Amino acid sequence: MLAIRKKLPNAEIVAVDVLAEMLELAKKKGVERTVMADVMRLPFADSSFDCATVAFGLRNLEDWGGALREMARILTANAHLLILEFSLPRSPVFRGVYRFYLHRCMPFLGSFVTRQKNAYDYLGQSIEEFPSGATMLQLIEASGFRNANAEPLSSGIVTIYTAEKRQD
């Protein structure tokens, strides 16, 4: 949200989440308008927004395609979709090291600090199960978007996916 504010200082940013705590955090970061809602049933009219973003949240939903289709519904023609999500590195060596960290080190360290090992076990599992690369691009395009692109960041630990809403 802060990066969007820097690039587009006059843009109206609307934060949507199912958790009040996340919306409070958005307000603290300067978002004026927050809406408690489920991404599967957004309370906005068709073609209401020029951009939709989600960071580290799509992976946690039960129906990734359904969420993408709902985002497409609220976007204007040619509007932009930006998704920032965890992924697995492409390099086999780094992927192996990362998986060891993700499934062994992070749950241990996380449970030591927070006493919530299950949350860190879930994180690794959800990253493994979430579609990435070409599979994710196909899902995005099948959900009402075009020109989908994936840009790995941080040696592939994170990927930013971009696309434009199709004009139907």
Image (cartoon, rainbow, N blue to C red):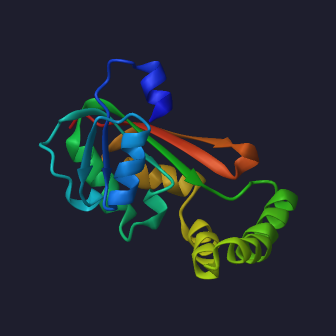
Q: Which residue lies at the image location 14% right of the left edge and 42% below the top edge? A: 46
Q: Residue 112, position in %: x, y? A: 73, 76
In front of the other: 3 or 68: 3
State whether residue 149 appears in this view: yes
Q: Farthest residue toward the right?
A: 93
Q: Quadrant of the N terminus?
A: top left
In the image: residue 104, left or right of residue 64: right
Q: Quadrant of the C terminus?
A: top left
Badge count:
0
In the image: residue 115, left or right of residue 106: left
Q: Residue 167, position in %: x, y? A: 24, 33
Q: Which residue lies at the image location 61% right of the left edge and 79% below the top edge? A: 116
In the image: residue 159, left or right of residue 103: left
Q: Quadrant of residue 62?
A: bottom left
Picture layout, residue 112 above or below residue 159: below
Picture layout, residue 139 above or below residue 141: below
Q: Quadrant of residue 90?
A: bottom right
State whether residue 143 appears in this view: no
